[in-house]
Amino acid sequence: MRNSWANIYRLGIKELWSLLRDPAMLVLIAYTFSLSIYVAATAMPESLHHAAIAIVDNDSSPLSARIAASFYPPHFKVARLVTARQADAGLDDGDYTFVLDIPADFQRDVLAARAPAVQLNVDATRMSQAFTGNSYIQQMVTNEVAQFVQRQEGGASAPVNLALRMRFNPNLEQSWFGSLMEIINNVTMLSIILTGAALIREREHGTIEHLLVMPVTPAEIMLAKVWSMGVVVALAALASLLLIVRGALHVPIEGSVALFMLVTCLHLFATTSMGIFMATLARSMPQFGMLTVLVLLPLQLLSGGSTPRESMPVLVQDIMLAAPTTHFVAAGQAILYRGAGLEVIWPQLLAIFGIGAVLFMAALGRFRKTISQMA
């Protein structure tokens, strides 16, 4: 048993040295857990976030002032009062995404029930924010006018008052969600790529034949690849979480980083085994790359990291329970966003371990078959 663990350790060290001699993989690791995380977190979100808006107030009434004061961060920047000429120039220069033009005598016409028109100019080149902000601004103006008229005419107040309170992300900051989900997705992607590439590299370079004549078993070879590549991805993820997410992006982490890393290590056990299994199916690196794309897309899109699982068909939800990423995303969100402890995420831990054990045994069986064919 002692010799077996020593073989696993030495073979793992060999994998680390082999990785250090591969500059392309080193660049991929560095980019995946640094610039990729930062770009994904700070890219322009589809929802409204600090949208630039200007108001042409030709009425200068309490109602128009109330409408202007309703635009504030984080959805909008503080509204700027401009003239019509400044508004046109600002739209041409890209300074404003929205310009709201309130006509003269607007408040008087509203109280007289004359249905005055308010003009909203939109810079449609900023398509995602323009589409969302158009309907959002219309709703805001309509609500402000309705509340103003109701108070002026002494109407009865609504029987229900809805008070919204955002938990865990009060300002709905896109970077808080995007950065952490990008780490979770990249852990899956990189662990599959590194282990699969390591096996295919040995096959292409002929070093796998050297291992076959040594007193090592297929299980020892597999475990060496699992722990070595898993350690690399785990350390890179930890550094990204502390330096990029918490340091550069200033994203608060509610839960225990150590508990998240425990879940990450279990997940790496499953995904590295998956990478080895896929590498035994592919005959070359291009084939492995195409197979990786086919596997990663469903894992990332249907695991709950991009779209809530509750919005998916029930059949898809049930099928994705067999994927380790589904449980990893659920546990990661619970720990990092809501500060959950072991008493909450233990079902996900058991599920990831069980799926990982099945994947490891399947990969080991396939790896033994591949080696026997080579021999």
Image: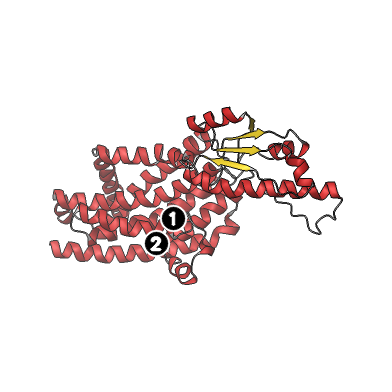
Q: Quick check: can you spot residue 159?
A: yes
Q: Quick check: can you spot residue 5?
A: no
Residue holding disc 2:
356
Locate residue 97 relative to residue 160 in the image: left or right: left
Residue farthest to the right, as pictured: 154
Locate residue 42, reporting x and y percent.
48, 38
Q: Secondary structure at mark 2?
A: helix
Locate residue 181, reporting x and y percent.
48, 49
Locate residue 340, reporting x and y percent.
60, 53
| Residue type marked 1 | Leu
Please name the residue shown 47% across and 36% down the image: 244
Please name the residue shown 59% across and 45% down the image: 172
Please name the residue shown 23% across and 60% down the image: 280
Q: Of label 2 and label 1, which has the lower sequence position? A: 1
Residue farthest to the bottom, as pictured: 315
Q: Secondary structure at mark 1?
A: helix
Viewport quadrant of the N terminus: bottom left
Looking at the picture, the colour scheme in use is secondary structure
Q: Dot 2: few (<14), some (14–19), or many (≥20) neighbours within 10 Å?
A: many
Compared to residue 157, the image places residue 50 above or below, namely above
**Of 353 and 46, the residue lying toward us:** 46
Locate residue 99, reporting x and y percent.
59, 37
**Of 307 and 61, the residue lying toward us:** 61
Compared to residue 329, the image places residue 77 above or below, namely above
Residue holding disc 1:
266
